[in-house]
Structures are given as C-alpha cells and as structure tokens.
Image (cartoon, rainbow, N blue to C red):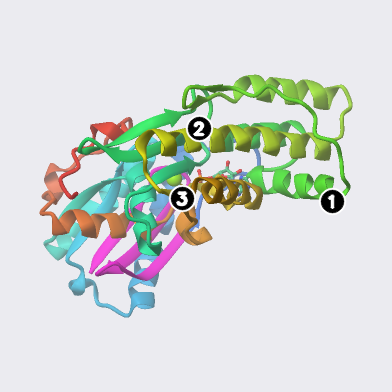
Amino acid sequence: MILGIECTAHTFGIGIVHRGKILANVKDMYKTEKGGIVPIKSAEHHREVAERLYIEALRKSEINEKDIEAIALSNAPGLAPCLLEGLRFAREKARKLGIKIIPVNHCIAHLEIGQSIGAKDPILLYVSGANTQIIAFAGEKYRVFGETLDIGVGNFLDKFARHIGCGFPGGPFIEELARHAKEENMIYIELPYVVKGMDVSFSGLLTKLQQLFDSGIDAGQLSYSLQETAFAMLVEAAERAIAHTGKKELVLGGGVACNKRLQEMCKIMCFERKAKFFCPAKELLTDNGAMIAYTGEIMLNAGISVNFDKLDIKPRERTDEVEVRWK
Ligand code: AMP
Ligand code: MG
C-alpha cells in the first residue's frame, strides 16, 4: 500500500494505491471568496484538514496505517508554504510508521496517472491554473515540448471571469456562458491567436477580451470565442508534439481539462491523427493524492525512496530536471 499526499497548491489530497489500484482518493480544496490563492493561507488550510483526510482515506480503503509501505509526497513544483506543510505531515507519519518517503513531481504524476486508464507512452496536455505544458517522455526524461510563455490557461480563464464579474474558479462559468452562446448561434469573434512553435501565450488574448467586454460585447459571445481560440491554440500545440515525437496517445490533465469543449476538440484531433485519446475521470484530472500514490508506487518498484529526514521540497523543479529511473 502506498499513501500519496498532494499539497502543491490549493488542494490537500490523500490517496491510497495498491498495485495500481486506487483504494481511496480524498481531498479538500482551499477556496477564496475573492481573488487568488494566498500561499500562507492555503498552507494553513492544508494543516487544518490533513489529519482528518488521512483518517478518512484509511477508513475508505479499509486498511490499517501499519499496512502503508511508503508515503509518496508531491514535493515539487509548487507554492513553498504548501509544499512545506505537506513535507511536515509526510515526515511526521513516516517517522511514526518507520517508513520511507517517495518524492514525486506533481506534473509527472498528472501524466503517469494516464496509465491507470490505459495510456502507455502518451503526450500529456497539462492544463491547470498555474501550469500549461505539453509533456512527453523522450531521451530518458520527461520533456516539456511546449508551454505557456506567460500565464497558465486556467489563470487566464479565471482572470477574464473576474473581469466580467464571475467568481473563482472562473473556468466553469465561462464554459456555461460559451455553451449558451453556441446554442443561440452567436457569431465567433476573431481574437489574437498566439502559437509560437509549440508554445502558447494568453496575455494578449486576455487584454483583447477585456477591451471587447468593456466596449459592450456580450460576455457569452466572448466566452464562446475565447474557448474556440484558446483551446484551438492548445490543441494545435499538442498536435504538433504528437507529429514531432511520433507518439500515438494523448492524455489530458489539470482542472481546465474538465472542460467538455476542450475534451471534444482533443478527441477530434486524435481521431484525425489516428491517435488514442485518454481523459481521466474528473477526480483524477484535478489535483489529487491518488495520482501521487500511483506514481510513487511505480517509483518505489524501481527502488526510489528516501529517508524522511533527507527529503526537501523543490518549489521550482522543472519537469526535465527529474531523473527518471523508473522507465
Ligand atoms: P487546477 O489548477 O488543475 O486545480 O485547475 C484549476 C483551474 O481549472 C482553474 O483555473 C479553473 O478555472 C479551471 N477549470 C475548472 N473547471 C473548468 C472547466 N469546466 N472549464 C475550464 N476551466 C476549468
Ligand atoms: Mg495540477
């Protein structure tokens, strides 16, 4: 049994995995009334919910804590105060149980969990609040083939949503507005489309959208046009990564991947490319402890673990810095 802890940003999650099977996956998300994440507050949230979730995960999976073989911890990348809180909790448990810790890179976990639904060697389109990356395994490492040059696509959606008076998270509001606009046959408005090689950029698009909204254009029509433009950029970059690497699978990850229109566009692209499309269930798409436990188990099977007192956090670890000894 591997117990996984997710703690990198707003979500504190605990998952329990045994031989690739997910036995529990519980989480609690730090939310704000207004504005974005305050790292210290999010860390306080993690501290408050950790023990409760730990007990809940053990109960759900019907195991005793003595059955835990090792603890997988998302020690990178992320917000330092949140990572430290996860580290503190993981250390406390590892010391008490006399077991080791497996340090897991959060972005790679989003990719590895794709295996639980059948992906073998995929391209990951990882679209979350802070991260927007296209990742794949090549030349002994997980490499970033493309990424945002400024803000993450989720933050972009949230910023526009805030501008038009919607709360956080903004993505689901925009999806709803866009769906209605489509049903009402609203016309697509041409917007800046920025793909540079396999990288994307959203800040110019955001400014344009804000200006159009301020000039009186309908929020629904803008949301619809926004989705068609921003998602087409992501899908183009992902398609180019597929073409470049010759890989035949695409996996989605991150909160924005919950968006049905993005899923649909990915599906169409994969169909046209004769690639397989994998979209994990919502609870595995968004930040969660099960993907950390799942990845941790694979790593442990390859002999990777450290003593709890040797482990540190790596807030800025890049995906391609991780030494991949388990493949
Ligand atoms: P994450 O950082 O992976 O937890 O994802 C959070 C981001 O996902 C936020 O920016 C949300 O606005 C965004 N998000 C959540 N649901 C949706 C959705 N249905 N459509 C678009 N974005 C979404
Ligand atoms: Mg994430």
SS category of the residue bearing label 2: helix
Which numbered disc, 2 or 1, marks the residue that appears first in the sequence?
1
Where is mark 1, residue-wise? 183
Whether residue 142 is visible here, answered yes or no, is yes
Q: Residues within 10 Å of mark 2 (few under 14, many from 20)?
A: many
The mark that comes first in sequence, 3 or 2, is: 2
Q: Residue at x 19, y 74 (%)?
A: 67
Picture quarter with the N terminus: bottom left
- Residue picked out by circle 3: 275
Q: Give x and y (percent) for residue 152.
A: 52, 32
Q: Is residue 183 left or right of residue 311?
A: right
The three-letter amino acid code for the residue at tag 2 is Ala
Estimate the spatial distance between the alpha carbons at disc 2 and disc 1, rounded to whole Å.
Answer: 28 Å
Would you say the beta carbon of the disc 1 residue lies within 8 angstroms of ligand 1? no
> At label 1, which amino acid type do we have?
Glu
Q: Can you identify the residue that label 2 sits on?
A: 237
Of callouts 1 and 3, the N-terminal one: 1
Task: State how far apart marks 3 and 2 are (Cα).
Answer: 15 Å
Q: Residue at 20% of width from left, 68% of height from top?
A: 68
| For discs 3 and 2, the disc positioned in front in the rendered view | 3
Magenta highlight on residue 9: yes
User: Of residues 296 and 85, which is closer to you in this image?
Assistant: 296
Q: Provide the residue span drawn in magenta.
A: 1-27
Q: Report the amino acid beneath label 3.
A: Ala
In the rendered image of this protein, does residue 60 appear above or below residue 260? below
